[in-house]
Image (cartoon, rainbow, N blue to C red):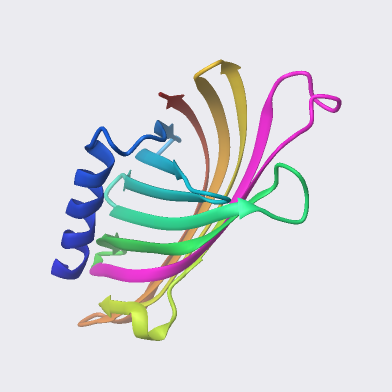
């Protein structure tokens, strides 16, 4: 747990300084049974974008997760298609069928965003997708496997805000005093992003 605290504090300090001139956004996502909040910051580099993000996710009493991500992205293959590669650390607690365990993992994160051309959609819409998977040496505590898939449509309704329709799938396998067990959860959510 201590191994994730230091990077989280470092990024929070870095993102709060005035010299970190980039794009910031706050997101709130909700579904019937969960709530998620995210803070993201993009720092434009020469021909790429360095991104950081912090998030918390709460679903009833099933799980409470916090994450931190660091990615480097650039336009690839097509104009405006931004592909990002990086790391995503996850820390939290899961509970299912009276079993409880701790999730701690550092996953490889691959993501892409693409704004749909205005010739196709008069309303500015961006498509996004991402996958995070933690390989063997980067899973700790009770974690045996951690996978997260995410996709979404961002409808920019005002200059600095967007409504998000998204899908998230989380799969975690644990091994602790209860033996081997897993959670697998898929959800559709609605959210709002505020850029500043």
Q: Is residue 122 magenta?
A: yes
Write the residue at 55% across / 54% down: 73
Q: Nearer the viewer, residue 41 or 21?
A: 21
Looking at this view, name the residue that lies furthest to the left: 2
Q: Is the magenta stretch mostly helix, strand or loop?
A: strand
Residue drawn where x is 26% and y is 32% of the image = 18
Vertical order, 51 against 166 (above or below): below
- Along the horizontal axis of the image, is 174 left or right of 93? right
Relative vertical location of residue 156 with respect to residue 77 in this rendering, above or below: above
Q: Is residue 81 above or below residue 122?
A: below
- Which residue is depicted at the point 33% across and 46% down? 55
Q: Can residue 142 be seen in this view?
A: no
Quadrant position of the C terminus in the picture = top left
Task: Reply yes or no: does residue 33 show up in magenta.
Answer: no
Image spot of residue 47 (x, y percent): 58, 50
Percent from the top left, x then y, of residue 74?
A: 60, 52
Q: In the displayed orientation, state which residue is furthest to the top.
A: 158
In-image side of 193 versus 11 (left or right): right
Front-lying residue, 143 or 76 = 76
Instruction: Give the position of the N terminus as an image quadrant.
Output: bottom left
Residue 186 locus on image (x, y percent): 52, 53
For the image shown, how many numbered marks are present on the structure?
0
Residue most extreme to the front: 46
Quadrant housing residue 156: top right
In this view, the residue in front, 85 or 95, is 85
Residue 193 image point, x, y percent: 46, 28
State the residue at coordinates (17%, 52%).
9
- Residues rendered magenta in the picture: 100-129
Whether residue 61 is visible here, answered yes or no, is: yes
Res 128 quadrant in image: top right
Q: Is residue 173 left or right of residue 153?
A: left
């Amino acid at each position: 747990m201590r191994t994730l605290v230091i990077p989280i504090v470092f990024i929070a300090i870095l993102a709060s300084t005035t010299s970190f001139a980039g794009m910031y956004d706050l997101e709130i996502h909700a579904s019937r049974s969960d709530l998620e909040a995210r803070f993201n910051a993009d720092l434009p580099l020469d021909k790429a974008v360095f991104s950081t993000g912090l998030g918390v996710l709460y679903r009833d009493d099933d799980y409470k997760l916090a994450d931190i991500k660091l990615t480097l992205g650039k336009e690839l293959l097509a104009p405006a298609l931004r592909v990002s590669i990086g790391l995503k650390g996850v820390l939290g607690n899961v509970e299912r069928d009276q079993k409880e365990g701790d999730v701690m993992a550092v996953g490889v994160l691959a993501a892409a965003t693409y704004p749909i051309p205005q010739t196709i959609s008069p309303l500015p819409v961006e498509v996004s997708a991402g996958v995070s998977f933690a390989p063997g040496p980067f899973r700790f505590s009770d974690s045996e496997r951690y996978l997260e898939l995410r996709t979404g449509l961002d409808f920019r309704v005002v200059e600095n805000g967007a409504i998000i329709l998204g899908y998230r799938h989380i799969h975690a396998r644990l091994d602790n005093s209860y033996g081997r067990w897993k959670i697998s959860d898929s959800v559709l959510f609605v959210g709002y992003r505020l850029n500043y």
